[in-house]
Amino acid sequence: MTKRSNEYMLRESRERYDALVQYLPDGILVHSDCRIVFANEAAIRLLGATAVDELLGQPIFPFIHPEYAHQLEEKIEQFLKAGRPHRSAFRKFVRLDGGIVKTEVHAVPITFDGKPAVQLIIRDMSEWIRMEETLHEKDDLYKTLVEHVVAGVFVEQNGEFVYLNPYLVKMLGYQAEEMLGRKIEEIVDEDELHTLRDSHFFVHDHGQKQFPFRVKGKHKDGSTIYLEGNSSIITFDGQEALLGTVQDVTMKYEREQLLLQNAKLYQRIMMCMPEPIVITHNERVLYVNRHAMELVGVTDDSCIVGRNLFDYIHENDREHVRGKLSWTISMDEPTSFSEARIVLSGGRVLEVEASNISIDNYMGKRVVLSVIRDLTERKRSEERMLRSEKLSVIGQLAAGVAHEIRNPLTALKGFTQLLRTKYRDETTYFQIMEGELDRINLIVNEFMTLAKPHLSPFQPGNMDAILQSVVSILDTQAILMNVEIIYRLQGELPLTNCNENQLKQVFVNVIKNAVEAMPDGGKVMITAQTMETLNGSSIHIQVKDEGQGIPQELIRRLGEPFVTTKEKGTGLGLMVSTRILEAHHGTMHIQSAPNEGTTVDISLPVL
């Protein structure tokens, strides 16, 4: 190979090397005798120059940060004597504009233009160091947050705790070194742990970002604590782990349990209260107690809960009730008891009175609690008292009237019979006169009964025998009117303290009314049985016919004098019967509907 060829190859190789060095991303800086003799493009930019001429021939020392400059000359001399590359080190270079550049420097001893020189390979590490410092700052920030957050934090990996923050360690009563390496089952109740496993708490691929949990834990001292928190899957030291946050909710749990117990207690109190209670929200029924269900006639609250309250309110009373509910909500005060009518199954109407009060938070809603009272018995008692007062007044009046009527009545009857014997051809008129006189005498006798029904002595009586006797008396009349009297005894009847003749008069009046209510024939059903009530045992007799029924406007007035559905009736029969039953401490209740017949319920106390 010729000398020219060698020179050509060397020149070509140097040009390739120069091009490679010039375009390297790292700065290349060569200094000899502590002066810069070469700099590539990256080095020029790194030191803040615009051209290489600004650097060539310049001493190296002004570009070295003062932290390293005082040792630099001695270190360069030692480095050149050693004759081997220097490991990477972090250095700070000073730019021409005074800025500081943090770098990583690799030094290599070389010969440049026949002189010993040092080649510096400089990498700008400012951005990397800035990122690292930022990461350290964030790491410190996160560590501070986790260490001082007012919540327990743990990392569980491969079934063991690998990290617990001080708050959680203190919460469980341990020292930090005691907890590392412990298994989760050591601080979680065994039954609770099974629940967690069943709920896929430990399954890392369940796809949930967070998994809330609430468990019963164990304190170091053996006491029970209740823990609540969230967990999620993270990567820790290159492996999957469970990160969780925990709060001690023992006091909260105990308060919840106390509130739950109180709620159950209040619910039991409301359920067992002797008066019906209904809770409504926006006119919808949310709760009814046992007595409210009994009032409506159902055994399951699902038949009522969820329905509109006004499905049970009589249409004529709805506006009144709606106004009361609105007033309760707006004024936040209980209302006084006010009367209304509710409609039960079968169209039966019940008179009640109710008082309302609003409750701010029932199942998260503002509701109205209504206390309801059935007025049926009170109304009956008032009616009985009013009727008793009427009977007392009528009885006193009847005693005097009857006494005054009887004397002239006896004379009229005697002279009528005398005239009948004298005028035998006019018998028709005399029969009418005698019939009307007998009718007057019957009314006078009923007046006398009204006046003194209680004077007859009482003794133990057999109700079954009394009823059978009355049925046998009226059976013939019933057959003539095509009416069948059916008497059914449901179980043995106890004795009752009574006057048998007076009770016979009561049942004669009631059963005779039932027979006469069916001019076209039918059936009269009579049942007798013993029933248990709040006041003890009683004998209950029911007489039911298939007649035309009694108009509602007359039912309330039955028992008043001369209030009757019969063309020639006086109404005194029921009045006398009511007086007799009162003397026996009994009651009589009449129910009737048009074209459905009439039912008379009579109750008498047992002996």
Image (tube, rainbow, N blue to C red):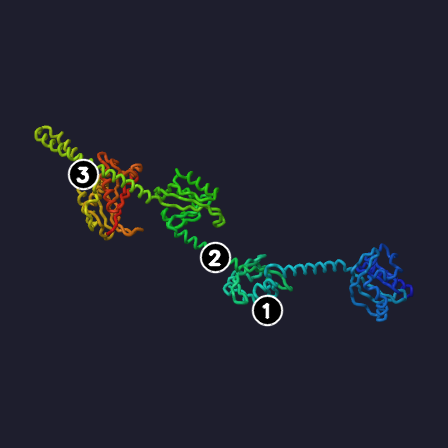
Who's the residue at 56% across and 62% down the image?
202
Tag nearer the camera, 1 or 2: 2
Along the viewing direction, whichever of 231 and 338 lies nearer the viewer:
338
Dot 2: element:
helix
For residue 597, what is the image quadrant?
top left
**Quarter of the picture holding the N terminus:** bottom right
- Disc 2, disc 3: CB below 8 Å? no
Q: Position of residue 398 (x, y in %)?
A: 21, 37
Question: Height in image: 533 above or below 391?
Answer: below
Real-space CA distance between mark 2 and mark 3, rounded to the nearest whole angstrom: 72 Å
The kind of secondary structure element at disc 1 is: helix
Q: Earlier in the sequence, mark 1 or mark 2?
A: 1
Q: Amino acid at mark 2?
A: Leu
In the displayed structure, does residue 441 sit left or right of residue 244? left
Q: Badge 2: how crowded within 10 Å, few (<14), some, or many (20+)?
A: few
Q: CA distance from mark 1 to mark 3?
A: 105 Å
User: Which numbered circle lies on residue 178?
Assistant: 1
In this view, which residue lies farthest toward the bottom? 82
Nearer-the-camera pick, 3 or 81: 81
Q: Which residue is mark 2?
A: 258
Q: Marks 1 and 3: which is nearer the front?
A: 3
- Residue hosting label 3: 445
Residue 558 percent across, percent down from the top left: 27, 38
- Among the two numbered marks 1 and 3 on one chain, the one whose residue lies closer to the N terminus: 1
Quadrant of the image occupied by residue 425 = top left
